[in-house]
Image (tube, rainbow, N blue to C red):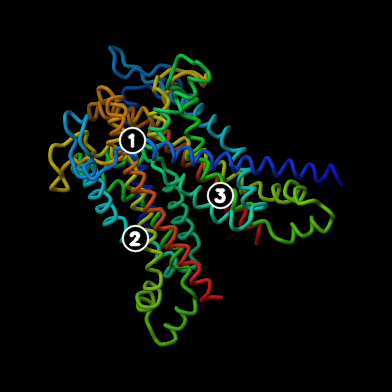
Amino acid sequence: MTSKSTTQTIAFLVLRLCTAAILVAVFLLAGFLVWNGAPVLSLQFLIESPREGMTAGGVFPAIVGTFYLTLLTLLFALPLGVGAAIYLSEYADPRRRRTLYIIRTATVVLAGIPSIVYGLLGLGLFVLFLRLGFSLLSSALTLSFLTLPVIVSASEEALRTVPMSYREGALALGATKWQVVRDAVLPFATPGILTACVLGVARAAGETAPILLTGAAYFLPQLPHSVFQQFMALPFHIFILSTQSVDPRLTRPLQFGTVLVLLLLVLSLNTVAIVVRSRYRRKYRRVSG
Amino acid sequence: MAALASVLIVVLIFVFLFSNGLQAFRDIDVVSFLTGTIWQPVSEQPKYGLVPMLTGSLLVTGLSILFSVPISILCATYLSQVASPTFREIVKPIIEMLAAIPSVVYGFVALIIIADVIQGILHNPIRLNALNASIVLSLMVAPTIISISEDAISSVPYEYKEAALALGASKWEMISKVVLPSSLSGIFVAVMLGVGRAIGETMAVLMAAGNAAVVSLNPLDSVETMTAVIAIEMGEVTFNSTHFYALFAVGGVLFLFTLVINLVAQVIVRRYKELGR
C-alpha cells in the first residue's frame, strides 16, 4: 500500500511540475514583454507616425493599417463563413454524408495549412493573376481565406447550441425553413457568431507571413486612402524593426512598444471572445437543461 | 454555395501552388530539386536543392515536438484528471491565450532573449540556431497538444474509471493503466496536429533559426526551413523567373506535408468516433 501511494504522490508531483512549468513560461513571457513594453507606451506612441528613419515616433500608421486590414478581411470572411455554417448546421441533408464529409474535411485541412502557403496563394491568385497588385485588398482577401475555418467552426458551434425546440416551435407555427433560420435560430446565435468574428479578427490582426507576400509595406509617408494601396501593419512593423533595420538595437524600445500594442489588441479580442462564449454556453445549458 | 467555399479554397491552393510550382521543373530537374543539397538560387549557375530546407524543417519540428510532447501531455493529464475544476477553469484560458499570441511576437522573444539565454548557458558561437527556434516553437505548439489531448483524456467513459477503482486501483494506477491507454489515439492526433503547426510555422522560425541553407542536424547550427526560405526570398525575386517558380514548388512540398498530416489525423478522429459509438 505504501509503495502504491508513494508512486502516486511522485506521479502527481511530476504532473503538477509540468503544469507549473507551462504556467511559469507564460508568466515569464508576459512579464518580460510588459516590463519592457510598458514604459514605451503612451498616447504619443499610439498617435504619432514613425520619425527620423523609423528610429523614433510612434506606430499610428501601423495601427490604422491593421484596423483597415482586419475590417476588410471580416467583410469578406463573415458572409462566407456564416453562410457555410448555416448550411452545415441547418440546411445540409444529414443523409448526404459524402458532401458533408468533403466540406468538413476541407475546412479542417484549411485550418491546418501554413500561413505562408496562404501567402503564396494570395500572391499567385490576387496579386498577379487577378492583377490586384500589392495592396490592402489582396492582403485582406488572402486573410479572409485564412480566417474562414475559424469563423465557420465557431459559428457552427453557436448555431448548434440553439435548442432544437426553438426550431420545432417555429416550424409548428408554419414558418418556412428560411423564416426559422432568420427568426428563431440566428437571433439566438448572434452572440456566438460575434465571438466567431472576434476570433477571426484576432487571428487576422496577428498574421505576418501572408501580408508579407501580398502588400504590407516597410514605411509609407501617408495612410492608405484606397484599397489598392499598400499599407503598414503592426505585426509586419515588429518584424521589420527587429530584423531588417540598420541597427535593431537602437529601436529596441520601439519594438517592445509595438509588440505590447499588438499583444494587447489580440489578447483583449480573445478575452472578449472567451467571456462571451462561456456566458453564452452557460445560458443555453440552463435553457435546454 | 458558401458552404463550398472551403472546398473551393483548397482547390485554388492546389491549382495556384502547382501551376506555378510545376513550371520550375522546366528548368530544374525534379530529382536534383528533391535530392540536391545546395540551395544557391542567386549565382552564375543557380542550384535549387531542397534538402537543406527539408532537414531544417524536420530538425526544428522534431526538436520542438520532443520538448513539447511530454510536458504537454502530462499537463493535459493533470488538468483533466487531477486538478480541481476551479483550477482547470482558470488555467485553460491562460493556455488558450498562448495559442492566441501572434507568431511574430514569439519570433521577437526568441530573437532577443531566448537566443541570449541559450548562448549564456551553452557558449555556442552561433547565436541564432535550430535549438532557439525549436524552444520557442515548443511553446507555440503546446496549447494545441494540451487542448486536444485534454479533450481525448476527458472523454474516457466513466465506467472504465469506476471499474478500475472498484478493482482496487489507486487513482494514479487508474490514470496510467486505464485512462491514458484508452485515450492514446486522441493523444496521437494531438501530436500530429502539433507537428502540422510546427512544420508550417513561418515568422517565429524565420526570426529565430538564423536562416543558413546548409544541411545540418546539429541543433546549434543555423538552419533554414521551407517556410522561411519562401518568406525571405519571395521579396527579392523576379516574378515568373525560375527562382520564383522554385519557391512555389517549395510551398507545394510544404502544403503536401501539412495536407497528409491533417488528413491522417482526420481519419484517426473519424475511426475513433465510430469505435466510441
- Residue farthest toward the right in the current orientation of the protein: A1
Q: Quadrant of the C terminus of chain A?
A: bottom right
Amino acid at pointer 1: Phe
Same chain letter for marks 2 and 3: yes
Q: Secondary structure at mark 2?
A: helix
Front residue (pair B149, B32): B149
What's the distance in space between the residues labelled 2 and 3, CA to CA? 28 Å
What's the distance in space between the residues labelled 2 and 1, CA to CA? 41 Å
What's the distance in space between the residues labelled 3 and 1, CA to CA? 32 Å
- Residue farthest toward the bottom in the current orientation of the protein: A173
Whether residue A144 sits left or right of residue B33 in the image: it is: left
Frontmost of labels 2 and 1 is: 1
Determine the residue positioned at 64% across, 44% down.
A16
Determine the residue positioned at 41% across, 40% down.
A114
Chain letter behind tag 1: A
Whether residue A201 sits left or right of residue B156 in the image: it is: left
Which residue carries the number 3 mark?
A: B148
Report x, y in % for residue A172: 44, 86
Number of marks drawn: 3
Which residue carries the number 1 mark?
A: A256
